[in-house]
Image (cartoon, rainbow, N blue to C red):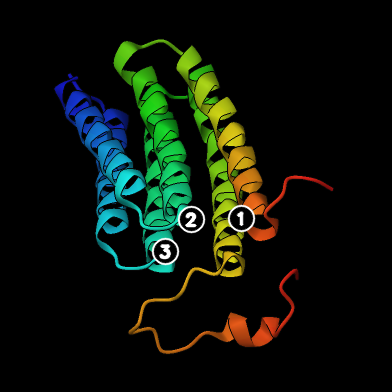
Amino acid sequence: MTTWNEIAGTVFIITGVVFDFLGCLGLLRFPDVYNRLQAGTKCVTFGTCGILFGIFLISGMNSTGIKALIGIPFVLLTSPVGAHALARGAHIFGVPLWEKSKIDQYKKDRGDKQRL
Amino acid sequence: MDTFNICFLVLIVSCFFCLIRAWLGKSIPDRMVAIDIMGTLAVGITALLAIITKRGFFIDIALAWIFLSFLGTLALAKYLAHKTLDE
């Protein structure tokens, strides 16, 4: 006795959980702070948005579903801003890039100013 | 509701991955990245609890957690960039 919205919501939630798992695997396995940041943040943001949208599809137009739908723009707005601030802070802190990284444009832009 | 329990278990395992990275991480920004990503994961876990237990107030906890995780991340990033929390 499953309706179409439960099936669609379950598919969205499973997709989000798979993205979360792969993002955390990338966080564990990549060699550098910046690689880990880009692997973890993008995958986990998309996965959490998928979980919230699946909850909206399952629970429908009641208070739980609307609040889950409101949570999606909040995650989409706050998580990349936090990740960008962390990457900038790590670069100013002086964490070196991986030795096989080819290019570092931010170092050239920043110049010698330590406190940008 | 067996599918959602398996999803919950996978998210808990992902949280343990983040904890392992925060434990092993060679530099301070590694640990901060792990804690930031674990905050976003906790939003997904708390929202999934609202479906598993059929209680709506877990969504409110998830909405509050988004902003708290964001503020914590910004404070940690400011500490990384300027070494102090003043000004």
Residue annotated with mark 3: A33
Which quadrant of the view contains residue A87?
Answer: bottom right
Q: Residues within 10 Å of mark 2 (few under 14, many from 20)?
A: many
Q: For residue A16, what is the image quadrant?
A: top left
Badge 1 amino acid = Leu
- Quarter of the image for residue A37 reads bottom left
- Residue at (36%, 29%) from the top-left corner? B45
Query: Residue A100: percent from the left, percent from the top?
Result: 33, 84
Across and down, in percent, residue B32 comes to: 48, 48
What is the secondary structure assignment of the residue under circle 3?
Answer: helix
Q: Nearer the viewer, residue B70 or A64?
A: B70
Q: Which residue is mark 1?
A: B80
Give the chain letter at badge 2: B
| Residue holding disc 2 | B29
Q: Do labels 2 and 1 touch, CB within 8 Å? A: yes
Query: Residue A52 appears at what percent x and percent y?
Result: 43, 35
The answer to whether residue A6 is left or right of residue A67 is left
C-beta proximity under 8 Å, tags 3 and 2? yes
Query: Can you name the residue that lies furthest to the right here?
Result: B87
Disc 3 packing (10 Å; few <14; some 14–19; many ≥20): many
The amino acid type, in three-letter code, at marker 3 is Val
Of A79 and B35, the residue lying toward us: B35
User: Residue placed at 60% from the left, 39% from the top?
Assistant: B72
Please report, as a chain letter, where disc 1 is located: B
User: In the image, B70: left or right of B53?
Assistant: right
Mark-to-mark CA distance, 3 and 2: 7 Å
